[in-house]
Image (tube, rainbow, N blue to C red):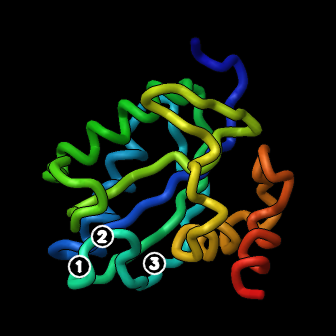
Amino acid sequence: MTPQQPVRAYLGLGSNLGDRKAHLLTALSLLTETDGVHVTRTSSFLDNPAVGGPAEAPAFLNSVAEIETTIGPHLLLQRLMEIEQALGRERRVKWEPRVIDLDILLYGDQIISSDDLVIPHPLLHERRFVLAPLAEVAPDAIHPVLQMTAKGLLDNLNG
């Protein structure tokens, strides 16, 4: 099902292999070429230690993109996975180092829990490397489950 009106969504981008900045820029470029997706803002690129993976994993470069989209969340996820594959991402082990990682953080005010997609991102409120760039581009974006702003969630982590 395709939304009639554009929906504001937020995407997390990360890379910790190779030319991390080039990978993020290429992913953003491919995203802008996607029918029904308009990138309206992007955060700074922030260096962050890898979380959840092997201790020796290289640091990530992370960013958040705000988009306006007329494609549904499942089709958006499919497109993000196509972009990851085009950039050489291989899914072998959870949280392994990767060329690119693209996640839907928020999709309007929707709450989705299916086998292949959970929105809002289930770890969004626990991850400074996502909340900091999200709060940079959209400090007032509301987490639809927790009913808190991105800035409020980040303040909670910092406090």
Residue placed most toward the observer, 65 or 104:
104
Please name the residue shown 58% across and 76% down the image. Answer: 128
**Upstream in the sequence, badge 1 or badge 3?**
3
Q: Position of residue 107 (x, y in %)?
A: 64, 40
Element assignment for label 2 = loop
Element assignment for label 3 = loop
The numbered dot on residue 57 is 1
Element assignment for label 1 = loop
The residue to which callout 2 is attached is 53
**Upstream in the sequence, badge 3 or badge 2?**
3
Left or right: residue 1 compared with residue 141: left
Say if 56 sits above or below 2 in the image.
below
Please name the residue shown 78% across and 44% down the image. Answer: 144
Q: How many residues crowd mark 1 within 10 Å: few (<14), some (14–19), many (20+)?
A: some
Please name the residue shown 30% across and 68% down the image. Answer: 15
Residue placed most toward the observer, 73 or 56:
56
